[in-house]
Image (tube, rainbow, N blue to C red):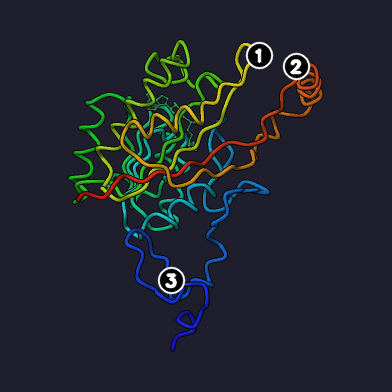
Amino acid sequence: MADTERDGNGAGNSRPIPYSDIDLAHWREYDHVWTDSLWLIDARDRTGGHALDYHGNFVPQIATQAYLRYTKEDDIVLDLFLGSGTSAIEAVRLNRRLIGVELQSDLVERARSKVPAEHLDDRIRLLQGDSGAAQTGAGVQKALGQMGAEHAQLLMLHPPYHDIIRFSEDPADLSNAPDVDEFLERFETVARQGFELLEPGRFAVLVIGDKYGAGRLVPLGFYCLDRMQRAGFYTKAIVVKNITGNERGKGRTSNLWRYRALAGGYYIFCHEYVIVFQKPAVG
Ligand SMILES: C[S@@+](CC[C@H](N)C(=O)[O-])C[C@H]1O[C@@H](n2cnc3c(N)ncnc32)[C@H](O)[C@@H]1O
């Protein structure tokens, strides 16, 4: 009898996971794959071409965990808010394919410069466009077809946290939405587009933080979760992750924030969310 079959925790059934390469027959060997809902990340992974070169990029470990958990090698990741291309670099590192969409053309060029030439426009396709536009959806569908696929196997969404960081002057930029309701409407449009492009039964990972406005907490994370559900996804997990890599921006202002927090009765954000969704399988 195999070691796992003797396990008393119901772990004896090592059927393959349809959406990942994790081999349950060796499930004890996956310490590097996290299953706890609290992620305390010491430092940004700066190996393998990753750098803190874009204010608002996510730590590569988010992509690492999402890919290991929810994709197989050669699967196609669709990132509809590519930014500086963290998800693309990680796709190369872990032998995944990727289609990335970003509104700002200079960022697309910057991301392209980080991808090895032999992968560019082949396993890694980076498109400029508004992820909420039908035309962009058609462009992604075309790219999928050129890669021999009908759907992507993982959807990554790391939108602006409304207007916390203004990413560009472009009116189509979600960070320029005039108010939270408009931001959420536009986010839902992107979520619906992503839903259509994702293979049934597969996963979506949303990275989002909350904000304060007019002396109140605006729970963007929960609002966006609701919009994902309206788009057709169901929620699998809410992970709370510490915010790392922004130390540059703290320094002199941290005392000021602490004073304001004490005076205003609120808490300083030290976390954001990594929310996992699944698209229902057909039938
Ligand atoms: C939080 S950042 C993503 C950072 C990315 N995960 C990284 O690691 O670099 C959000 C990005 O979404 C882009 N963006 C905003 N509105 C968009 C839209 N309508 N379509 C496509 N990209 C958009 C912004 O230009 C910005 O680069």
Q: Is residue 186 above or below residue 82?
A: above
Q: Is residue 92 above or below residue 58?
A: below
**Label annotation for residue 24:** 3
For the residues bearing labels 2 and 1, Cβ distance under 8 angstroms: yes
Ligand 1's quadrant: top left
**Residue at left offset 51%, top offset 31%:** 221
Among the two numbered marks 2 and 3 on one chain, the one whose residue lies closer to the N terminus:
3
**Label annotation for residue 241:** none
Element at badge 2? helix
Amino acid beneath label 2: Gly
| Residue 98, percent from left and from top | 34, 46
- Mark 2, residue position: 264
The quarter holding residue 94 reads bottom left
Taking the image as shown, residue 1 lies to the left or right of residue 120, namely right
| Residue 1, percent from left and from top | 44, 89
Between 120 and 185, the residue placed more toward the observer is 185
Taking the image as shown, residue 160 lies to the left or right of residue 254, namely left
Between 123 and 13, the residue placed more toward the observer is 13
Amino acid beneath label 3: Leu
Among the two numbered marks 1 and 3 on one chain, the one whose residue lies closer to the N terminus:
3
- Mark 1, residue position: 215
Between 170 and 20, the residue placed more toward the observer is 20
The quarter holding residue 88 reads top left
| Residue 129, percent from left and from top | 31, 27
